[in-house]
Amino acid sequence: MLRHVTGLPAEPAVMIAKMQHVNVGVIGLGNVGSGTLAVLADNADQIALKLGFRLRVTAVCSRTVAAKKLPESLGAVYRTTDWRQVVAHPDVDIVAELVGGTTVAAEIIDGAIANKKSVVTANKELMATCGSEIWDRAIHAGINLAMEASVAGGIPIHAVLREGISGDRVVALYGILNGTSNYILSEMEKRSAPFDEVLAEAQRLGYAEADPSADIDGLDARSKLAILAALAFGEKITPADIFVELIRRISPMDFQYAHQLGHTIRLICGARQTPDGLILSVRPALIGSQTIIAGVQGAYNAVWVKGRYGEDTFYYGRGAGPLPTGVAVVSDLMRVAREIRHGRPERVSPFAHERLGEYKPLSVTSEKCAYYLRFRVDDRPGIIAALAGILAEQRISLEAVLQLPNETKHDLPFVITVEPTYEHAVREAVQKMSHLEFLREPPLALPMEPPL
Ligand SMILES: NC(=O)c1ccc[n+]([C@@H]2O[C@H](COP(=O)([O-])OP(=O)(O)OC[C@H]3O[C@@H](n4cnc5c(N)ncnc54)[C@H](OP(=O)(O)O)[C@@H]3O)[C@@H](O)[C@H]2O)c1
């Protein structure tokens, strides 16, 4: 429940009343739009005290705007189903694009720029694919573009990378950026429940969409990593350049084996600098149980950044939801409104770098890492020898073989861990192993991330 902040000290209230409002038009009144309006209405007095002037919602738009209930304290607000009327409205200074997707949202932002209105957006998909081009157009038009809510909802990670640690040189960034996947994996771990069962529950609880593919197939996390990596490393990164692996094959037994190894499993978004360039991936990985990122449970998000000088910093919070994301949108509105009210000659790019460099994709296969290989076999003599032979052919050194007690001989799981090796060698080995007739399914290979 939101608490109402009542009564302002007389003097600031008088001063605030004297300063002109900055006017906001909100397009999209779904989860994020409604959360944004709730925060703007409920926290209006605090926001005004911080800014020295008020943020006033003058226009709202959605396809079903007539059916939307707006917070009463917003007062008279112009309602429309046509976003063009908001971007062209003379009483709108900043447009909040909270529709999502890459079609209408792109038109809205273009329309706002054409009308010289600054834009605040929560749109990871659009910002990941063409955010830097949109920024170029925005700066050319003399307006601002802010996108804090596009990654990790309530965690102010843009502000951190753009300003907080901008003096450092980032060498690696790891994140848990998709709350739905993290909820599924941490519930599987807690209750030994299978993937499909936890996914169905996540859908019932509203953590996962009816069509959960963007979340569980890593596409949502990929867009977010593209934005964060651009911010952190100053390169133009397209989501298509990021290696993605699904979490669908993880089962409760993988957590049992991971625990035996002192690890857990999470969908890790990783961006690390190597002498040859950046390696970018969104994939399930084994991470040490004692690491701070392993403690991220349920629908929470986290970002861990390693800088050359400042070393480790860690950011944690709610990655989605109307109010946490609403706070991110409102904070952007405040930042942009300050600029409109007080003027600022130098706008800081939402990508933290004056110009983004050209990124040459570097394959994850060139990375060296220890691996977890999980097998399900129809038990018989000679299995380990056959698998070890294939590993030896690829010059991969076996580290340990683990087998937990199991009653059935026809579907027997066990795990082999291997010493740090190149991913291309592991892939070749897995490809060769897949033809062995005693395997019930192709081996599952997961990287074991070095301590984060
Ligand atoms: N949900 C989150 O927690 C979260 C977190 C971070 C970022 N985001 C991002 O925030 C954005 C919005 O997400 P959401 O979850 O709030 O989506 P949502 O609940 O589906 O809301 C979308 C809103 O856009 C409106 N809309 C769609 N097409 C329109 C059009 N042609 N003209 C006018 N209005 C239109 C819809 O109108 P009707 O309601 O009338 O149909 C709805 O109000 C997305 O970019 C998303 O990736 C979401």
Image (spheres, rainbow, N blue to C red):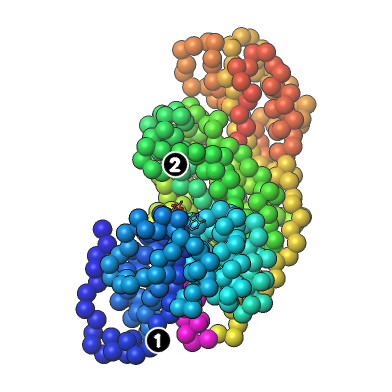
Q: Is residue 290 left or right of residue 363?
A: left
Q: Is residue 417 left or right of residue 206?
A: right
Q: Nearer the viewer, residue 59 or 73?
A: 59
Residue carrying label 1: 20
Mark 1: is the Cβ under 8 angstroms from ligand 1? no
Marking on residue 297: none
Residue carrying label 2: 208
- Identified by mark 2, the residue type is Ala
Q: Quadrant of residue 76?
A: bottom left
Does 98 appear in magenta? no
Q: Tag 1, which secondary structure?
A: loop
Residue interval drawn in magenta = 331-343
In the displayed structure, 229 sits above or below 295; it is below
Q: Residues within 10 Å of mark 2 (few under 14, many from 20)?
A: many
- Tag 2 and tag 1, C-beta contact below 8 Å: no
Q: Residue at x 37, y 31 (%)?
A: 191
In the displayed structure, 99 sits above or below 137; it is above
Q: Is residue 197 left or right of residue 387?
A: left
Of the two numbered discs 2 and 1 in the rendering, the one whose residue sits closer to the viewer: 1
Q: Nearer the viewer, residue 87 or 220?
A: 87
The picture places residue 266, in percent across and down from the top left corner, at 51, 42
The picture places residue 244, in percent across and down from the top left corner, at 63, 42
Q: Residue at x 51, y 81 (%)?
A: 339
- N-terminal label among 2 and 1: 1
Q: Residues within 10 Å of mark 1 (few under 14, many from 20)?
A: few
Give the dominant element type of the magenta stretch: helix, strand or loop.
helix
**Residue 350 visible, this orientation:** no
The quarter in which the N terminus is drawn is: bottom left
Q: Residue at x 58, y 11 (%)?
A: 379
Tell me how far mark 2 sits from mark 1, CA to CA. Answer: 42 Å
The picture places residue 252, in percent across and down from the top left corner, at 46, 29
